[in-house]
Image (cartoon, rainbow, N blue to C red):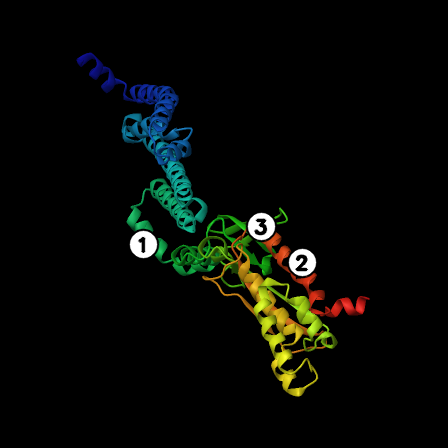
Amino acid sequence: MQQLTSIIELHPGYTYLVVVVAAMLASRFLQPLIGRVALRMAIRTESVVDDLYVDALRPYRFVHFLPFGLAFFLAQMAEPWAYEARLISGLLLIVLAVENAIKILNGTVAVIRHKSEKQGSSSTGYIDLLKVLAVIVGIALAVSITIEIDIMTLVTGIGAMTAFLMFVFKEMLHSILASLKIASWNLIREGDWIIVPHFKADGEVMSIGLFDIKVRNWDVTTALIPTHEVLDVATTNYRNVQVIERARRIHEHLLFDIESIRLCDRPLLERLAKLDLISDHVAENLEVLKKFDGAEDDPRCAAEVLTNVELFRLYIDHYLRSRDDLHHKQHFTLVRALAPTRHGFPLDIYTFTRQTGFVDFANVQTSVLAHLIAMVDQFDLQLFQIRYEN
């Protein structure tokens, strides 16, 4: 032991070199070993969290903290190259620390996305901010080591340049504030369907970053929206439709030729009496006609007998309420007449489907409209556009 100590004292530079090289070789051996051990331990546990962190840390370069740390703290042995050895090893330690900090943050993002599942996440902007802070701290430490100045003194000096930095990095600061607002108020999540006409975005949010939001449009194109601008333009989010309410609105209107609207006569009512959905209303109108001996032109009769468009409105309302694929209690169903226009007499239809997916919603909407259009002739009505096409 005394002989080894004397050799170290006589040749500190060579000792330093041997220790660092040996640590480098050991780290090269430990790197795959730690990887295999960590992978096996992650597989054996039921939690997915450790799997995500183990995957994010690959290829496990954090083992190089051992040789770089020894090189930094034993740098005084490398005289007359102590300053250079300490500087190089210190910079390598900072780079390694920043790299692994970013990897851990990436693992955190994966964990957040896994736990949020289909609901999506809106907090990844925080992670991007932490990545930026990690890089800034790393740069500050690197400058501090390079020019041999106390870190607090350096931070004080940087404070004097705050106004200049705020001007230069204005967009970055706006992005940071927008990310914080999106995450705090839960405005947008990954997986949400959003429409941002200003950026030609209409699709699913794939990722929310500090600087941009990536949207996969329904036409399979990709739109990138600057994070700091998404809150400044008109944005529609369909999360309530898809996840919370699970209801999607059908809002359509049918335009009828005004000349086809008339009071119901006996032949029309007798034909419509076969429709179970409005048989009660038809029976009431037949009773009115019997009271006036079928005199449809009697003014008193005209005041009590419904028109064909009123009966059709009642039919639409009952038909919509009879469908199991539409909401009836949680959301309203409404069929109303609007003021006539030069395009005809409109019936406005509001209802909400239980299916919110694009294809399923389209199928329900098509089924409803096709049925209603097919029933128009039964009420002796005529759609406005059909009249003029014929």
Q: Quadrant of residue 289?
A: bottom right
The residue nearer to you, when weighing 60 against 166, is 60
The residue nearer to you, when weighing 329 against 208, is 329
Which quarter of the figure is the C terminus placed in? Answer: bottom right
Q: CA distance from mark 1 to mark 3?
A: 61 Å
- Mark 2 nearby-residue class (10 Å; few <14, some 14–19, many ≥20): few
Q: Quadrant of residue 348?
A: bottom right
Which comes before the other along the chain, label 1 or label 3?
1
Which comes before the other along the chain, label 2 or label 1?
1
Q: Quadrant of residue 347?
A: bottom right
| Callout in the foreground (2, 1) | 2
- The residue that label 2 is drawn on is 370
Find residue 151 and report its horizontal and vertical position in percent. Answer: 30, 46
- Vertical relation: 261 (above or below) 375: below
Which comes before the other along the chain, label 2 or label 3?
3
Which quarter of the figure is the N terminus placed in? Answer: top left
Find residue 307 and report its horizontal and vertical position in percent. Answer: 65, 76
Q: How many marks?
A: 3
- Mark 3 nearby-residue class (10 Å; few <14, some 14–19, many ≥20): few
Q: CA distance from mark 2 to mark 1?
A: 72 Å
Q: Residue furthest bottom?
A: 299
At label 1, which amino acid type do we have? Thr
- The residue that label 1 is drawn on is 156
- The residue that label 3 is drawn on is 360
| Callout in the foreground (1, 3) | 3
